[in-house]
Amino acid sequence: MTWTTTVHPWSSDFDYLGHLTAAVYPKAFEQARVDYLRDRWRTRAPAYVVAAQRMQYLKEVLEADGPLKVALRPVRVGRSSFDLAGLLCDAEGAVCNRSDATLVAWDLETRRPRPLTAGERDALSADITA
């Protein structure tokens, strides 16, 4: 299953060339990941860290292209980690950026990776098969 949300960049997120700055793309994906995991894990503060993120810039984003949509879907669930594929699209639906991220469930007390709970795993796995 693909989950989507809307991102509204600020005017200051655009550089002197008129396009979305490179620093905003990871921020948009992170905002979407937090919202996705809040929804799926039914928690206000999902505990995870980003272990890796790979992005491919496909099309420039101008301020007039908003609002932007971020679509996420899990593609792999491991013991402690999982992979999310993401797309950032303009208001017309054109794909502007592609992201592949590996996230790791995080233990706030030990400051180390932890196993995914059964509920977290089930929520992610359900979206893979949906």
Image: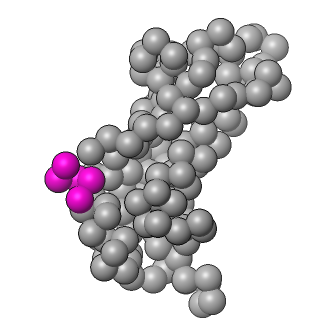
Nearer-the-camera pick, 93 or 53: 93
x 51%, y 18%: residue: 90
- Locate residue 17, reporting x and y percent: 75, 11
In the picture shown, does residue 46 fall above or below 31? below
Q: Residue furthest left?
A: 129
Q: Is residue 4 above or below residue 44?
A: above
Q: Is 68 drawn above or below residue 99 in the view shown?
A: above
Left or right of 31: which side holds 91? left
| Visible residue check, residue 85 | no
Q: Position of residue 11 (x, y in %)?
A: 79, 21
User: In the image, 70: left or right of 44?
Assistant: left
Q: Quadrant of the N terminus?
A: top left
* Residue 96 in view here: yes
Residue placed at 32% from the left, 52% from the top? 74
The secondary structure that dominates the magenta segment is: helix
Q: How is the image coloured?
A: one colour
Task: Identify the residue at image location x=34%, y=75%.
Answer: 119
Q: Nearer the viewer, residue 66 or 96?
A: 66
Residue 90 is inside the magenta segment: no
* Relative image position of residue 89 (x, y in whole percent): 47, 23
Say which of 60 and 3 sits in front: 3
Q: Is residue 23 left or right of residue 1?
A: right
Q: Position of residue 3 (x, y in %)?
A: 38, 42
The residue drawn where x is 41% and y is 60% is 40
Seen in the picture, residue 60 relative to 31 is either above or below; the reply is: above
Q: Which residues are magenta?
A: 126-130
Furthest residue in direction bottom, as rendered: 110
Residue 60, located in which quarter of the rendered image? top right
